Structures are given as structure tokens and as C-alpha cells.
Amino acid sequence: TWVFTLIAAAVVITVLVKARYVESKRWAVVIGLLLGGTTGNLVDRLFRAPGFAVGHVVDFIHTPWLVPAVYNVADIGLTLAVLGAIALLITNVPLRRVVTDPATPQQNESEDS
């Protein structure tokens, strides 16, 4: 439906705007997979039948022996992006490098007591 088209377009725009702030190579890969998967499905929704912004996503990979589903390359990218994001969040990998300002004095915990 057109709702999924709007959501996908919003995700693509948001990722494109925010991606320039990512400094971690691992997060860059995850965001690239997210962007690729979302863009792939968005292109199908925009330009395939039955019409503009309401087109059907073409699923052509069928693996009944592994996962009983039909999906496409964009779905694989989205799935890997979600799994990668979960792994990076669990392992506390930051999107940006943590920079400490040498001009700011570090306080000891003992000073707070």
C-alpha cells in the first residue's frame, strides 16, 4: 500500500541525512544494508504494477528447505541490517567515536563524595 511507500521513503531520506555522522565502519555496513534493502523495496513499490507508489514488491527467492518463505535480495539486506544493529547495540559499539576534550579536567569519583 501507499503507507509502506511513505514509510520506506522516510527511512531512505532519514538514513541519507544521518549517515554522514556515522564514524564506525561496522555501523556504516549496517546502515548500508538498511539503505540498500529499503531502497530496493521502495523502487519496486514506486515503479511496479499496479501503479505508482502502490506497486508490488517482487519476491523471487524461495528456500523451503531453510526458511519456508519467499523473499528478495532487499529483504536479505534488511534482515542482515537488523541482526547487525542488534549485535552492535549489544556490544556497545558507538556510531561516533568518543572524543574526550583534553582542556576539560576529568573529575575523579572520589571528588564527588
Image: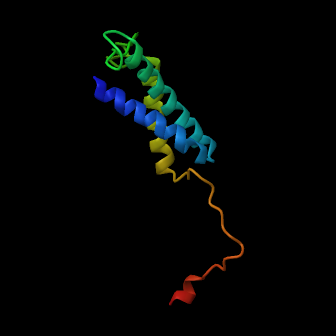
Residue 102: percent from the left, percent from the top? 72, 72
Residue 106: percent from the left, percent from the top? 64, 78
Q: Quadrant of residue 66?
A: top left
Quadrant into which the N terminus falls? top left
In this picture, residue 93 sits left or right of residue 38? right
For the point 66% across and 67% down, the residue is 100
For the point 48% across and 33% down, the residue is 34
Indicate how the structure is coloured in the image: rainbow
Residue nearest the viewer, comparing 6 with 69? 6
For the point 57% across and 89% down, the residue is 111
Please give the count of numbered marks on the rendered protein.
Answer: 0
Q: Residue furthest front?
A: 52
In this picture, residue 23 sits left or right of residue 3? right
Residue nearest the viewer, comparing 99 with 26? 99
In this picture, residue 98 sits left or right of residue 102? left
Q: Quadrant of residue 29?
A: top right
Residue 80: percent from the left, percent from the top? 47, 31
Residue nearest the viewer, comparing 96 with 3? 3
User: In this rendering, is residue 98 above or below 107?
Assistant: above
Residue 27: percent from the left, percent from the top? 56, 42
Q: Quadrant of residue 19?
A: top right
User: In this rendering, is residue 53 above or below 10?
Assistant: above
For the point 46% across and 50% down, the residue is 90
